[in-house]
Amino acid sequence: MIYRATGNISAIQILLGHTKIENTVRYLGVDVEVALLLEERTEI
């Protein structure tokens, strides 16, 4: 729900305690390339 509201994958990664973005996107069901592009655009 947070991802849908904010698009902030980095925040989700931190909240879930993941060290790799790949693990986070697997849980979100998002394409890795799209996730990395969104992560680059987002600062937390």
Image: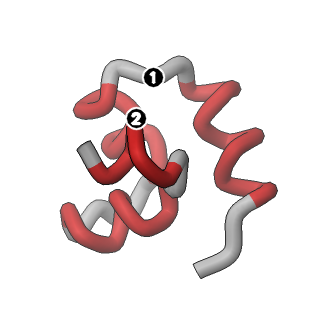
Q: On the picture, is 27 further left or further right than 8?
A: left
Q: Is disc 1 placed on a helix, strand or loop? A: loop
**Residue 37 quadrant:** top right
State the separation of the CA atoms marked 2 and 1: 5 Å
- The residue that mark 1 highlights is 30
Q: Quadrant of the C terminus?
A: bottom right
The kind of residue tagged 2 is Val
- Image point 67% across, 27% down: which residue? 34
Residue toward you, 6 or 11: 6
- Image point 54% across, 19% down: which residue? 31
**Residue 22 quadrant:** top left
The kind of residue tagged 1 is Val
Q: Residues within 10 Å of mark 1 (few under 14, many from 20)?
A: few
Of the image marks 2 and 1, the number of the one nearer the N terminus? 2
Q: Is disc 2 placed on a helix, strand or loop? A: helix
Q: Quadrant of the N terminus?
A: top left
Q: On the picture, is 38 further left or further right than 7?
A: right
Up-down relation of residue 29 to residue 41 (above or below): above
- The residue that mark 2 highlights is 25
Up-down relation of residue 14 to residue 26 (above or below): below
Query: Where does the image place residue 15, in percent across and percent down from the top left?
Result: 24, 70
Q: Are marks 2 and 1 in contact (CB under 8 Å)?
A: yes
- Image point 53% across, 46% down: which residue? 7
Q: On the picture, is 10 further left or further right than 35?
A: left
